[in-house]
Image (cartoon, rainbow, N blue to C red):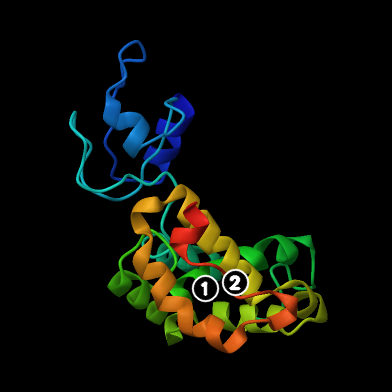
Amino acid sequence: MNNVHIALHEAKADYTTVNIDLRNRPEWFAIKVNSAGKVPALAYGGPKVTGEPSPEAFMLAESAAGPLPRRAEALQALLPPSGYAVGEWSIADAALTPVLKFAEMALENGIGTFTEDAGKQALETFRSPKFARLQKYLEDVKARPSFEESYHEVSNICYCLNYMAVYRPNYEGDYHNCIQSNFEVEAGYRGHEKPQSFVELKR
């Protein structure tokens, strides 16, 4: 894991290393950290790792609410004063746009491993004057025909719901309820049917 440690040090990240005995893996490791039981593994957020199962599930995927403002700040600093990522439209924009929009969509709909308050705060920060340039960039990209033709809000929300239901079963209720009203309005949008509930998806 030398490369991981080097990256963490370079990022000045606050982290804790937990050594796992591969011949006698603790039960909580597969349940809370890596379902495959393999190392190395990263867990972001949640309580400190101990030898006993924690009261909350460890998440391998980073939540959007925590890292987003820091990453948005770094990304905005790299953007030119106007235009796209490198001035003219390029493959860099095609790669970057879905990531930004997906994060925004997750925060808007409360889908993720963050609390409702943390999600709202991150979204407010993301839409504040502090990130005016990044927001202008995202709006410019979203206005392109290629984005309008390829991005389907309902499909992406359905995908997130399915992902959370399968891989984040401890986070089932609130995420479905908080976006239910969106589907009531948009059911059938672009030919997509209204999704099932989390309970049904898990079966």
Q: Residue 27's mark?
A: none
Mark 2 — residue?
Answer: 101
Mark 1 — residue?
Answer: 104
Element under disc 1 = helix
Quadrant of the rendered image containing residue 49: top left
Q: Nearer the viewer, residue 157 or 75?
A: 157
Quadrant of the rendered image containing residue 122: bottom left
Q: Amino acid at mark 2?
A: Lys
Q: Is residue 13 above or below residue 100?
A: above
Element under disc 2 = helix
Q: Nearer the viewer, residue 53 or 183?
A: 183
Residue 171 x/y as whole percent: 36, 58
Name which residue lies at 33% across and 76% down. 121
Residue 139 x/y as whole percent: 64, 84
- For the residue carrying disc 1, how many other residues have a C-alpha within 10 Å: few (<14), some (14-19), or many (20+)? many
In the displayed structure image, the side of residue 100 where residue 30 appears, left or right:
left
Q: Is residue 166 above or below residue 187?
A: above
Q: Is residue 163 above or below residue 25?
A: below
Residue 126 seen in the figure: no
Residue 153 seen in the figure: yes
Residue 8 x/y as whole percent: 39, 40
In the displayed structure image, the side of residue 198 where residue 57 appears, left or right:
left
Q: Amino acid at mark 1?
A: Glu
Q: Are marks 2 and 1 in contact (CB under 8 Å)?
A: yes
